[in-house]
Image (cartoon, grey):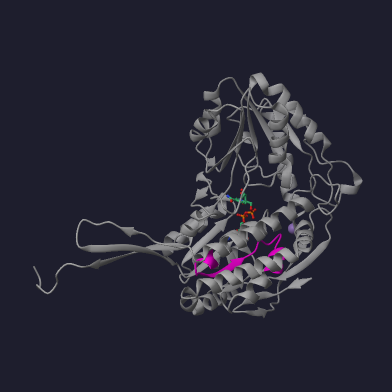
Amino acid sequence: MHYPLSIGGRQRSVDRRIDVENPATGEIVGSVGSGNRKDAVQAIEAARDVARTWQQSDPHERERALHAVADRIENDVEEIARLLSRETGKCLGTAEDEIRETVSQFRFYAGVTDKIRGSTIPTPTDRFNYTRRAPYGVTAHIVPWNYPVLIGSRSIATALATGNTVVTKPPGSAPLSTMWYGEYLVDEFPDGVVNIVPGPGNEVGAELTENGDVDAISFTGSNRIGQRVIESAAKNIVPADVELGGKSPAIVLPDADPTEAGVGIATGIFSNTGQNCVATSRLIVHEEIKQAVVEEIVRQAESIELGPGTDPSTGMGPVISASAQKDMQAYVEMAKESGATLLTGGTIPNDPDLSDGHFFQPTVFDDVEPDDRIANEEIFGPILSVISVSTVEDAITVANDSRYALAASLWTERLEATTIADRLDHGVVAVNSFPVTMPQSPFGGNKESGIGREGGLEGVRAFTTVDSVIVDHSEMGTGYR
Ligand code: NAD
Ligand code: MN
């Protein structure tokens, strides 16, 4: 399987290519063309050429195209999920959920196309004031590998629904499933409206954020790169919606059901092998219920079968790379040195069947202090830190004491749940569930977890300006006063 670039509705073959590896087995799954800055510039030009006409397109044309893409992806759910599972290592079930949610996302934004409205504004004079939402023009979309299809399509569907043109760079380690549904996008939309340029982040990604012809940027990824994207956006004075890392707290209060909380939090930290921006990586548990919750999480961790994502019996796949696997080992050493207690996991499994992949055991550390590095840094793997507290106040304080503020969860049967939720300074707060995404729901982080919101109707704001029109109805013709 090989995919070339797609620019202006045409396939472009290039000399360099990226081989995509299955992190569970080391097999080469396929390859994509590896674009450079010049290819990125040409993709931006192609998007620029049609931006004006596309901006004026009939909303129902955009609706039809978005539904057509949804239909075609829906037809292929199993096949795309299989490919996604092979290129990322994630479990088939997780991959299928991702593709199905992607279909819903396209349908949601198909429905949005003819419902983008401004407002009429009362003014004290004879002036009639109304606003309209206008697309920015050319939008760039830079996507991480952990949920490449869901995250890429979230901003792409919103941008297309609102009348923008698109240039996207799929992630280098898992570009194939994007290229698969990308063909449907290129097919269903007029030439030049969607352009797809895989390639190195520091070439193609950098060009997409530095080029003065790009009118708005959507970036999801790490804080290190996100900060550079914001710097480039500042130079060109263009809006950048950036969705960055997390260190999400899960608070469990004494009245919660310990089994439900344990299962939910284990799912929140071990699903997708912990490579979740919203992974429930900090368990902040009241000492009265701690033992029961932690026992359940350890039971869950020890029952998870490691293996390739494509094997139906697998409960957790590998981490994405050998270097991520080394990071896990380093964090385990760090945690031990800081005095945390290893309850389970902590090593690379010694099963010879798994030795070709980048596997790491589901890991739980107890007695973690809020200041410890493992409680503060985004590990992006299956390692849970357990922090004990003795009051609700302390739980809220520890939960909020982080540079990250993406998604918190709160486990309690108390009616005051929403009162506590209101005091959690996080972009998303889930009550009695690990954090989830839904096409209808806004998603994004506070503090250093990002700027802006994608998803839902809020996502429309990331891809449109508000223009204000003021019509003067007063008697004119009296000349200058
Ligand atoms: P990353 O920052 O390494 O890469 C993200 C994208 O940026 C990739 O496509 C990469 O090729 C590109 N890139 C690299 N260098 C670039 C440059 N100089 N200019 C422009 N683009 C460049 O992140 P990753 O490892 O792919 O993803 C993991 C990170 O993403 C984690 O920190 C995770 O929390 C975060 N994430 C956040 C969300 C969210 O919605 N907040 C969702 C998923 C992942
Ligand atoms: Mn890969």
Above or below: residue 244 compared with residue 466: above
Q: Is residue 371 visible?
A: yes
Viewer-side residue, 160 vs 8: 160
Q: Tell me how many marks there are.
A: 0
Q: Does the magenta stretch include residue 112?
A: no
Assign ligand 2 to one image quadrant.
Answer: bottom right
Q: Residue 82 appears at what percent x and percent y? A: 79, 59
Q: Residue 178 appears at what percent x and percent y? A: 68, 65
Q: In this view, does 5 lie to the left or right of 359?
A: left
Answer with the quarter of the image where residue 432 lies.
top right
Q: Is residue 143 visible?
A: no
Q: Does the magenta stretch include residue 167?
A: yes
Q: Residue 330 appears at what percent x and percent y? A: 71, 39
Answer with the quarter of the image where residue 469 lies.
bottom left
Above or below: residue 294 compared with residue 326: above
Above or below: residue 228 compared with residue 435: below
Specify the quadrant that holds the N terminus. Answer: bottom right
Above or below: residue 98 compared with residue 75: above
- The residue depicted at 82 percent of the width and 34 percent of the height is 302
Specify the quadrant that holds the C terminus. Answer: bottom left
- The residue depicted at 75 percent of the width and 61 percent of the height is 77
- The residue depicted at 82 percent of the width and 39 percent of the height is 304
Viewer-side residue, 67 vs 320: 67
Q: What stretch is highlighted in magenta?
A: 159-181
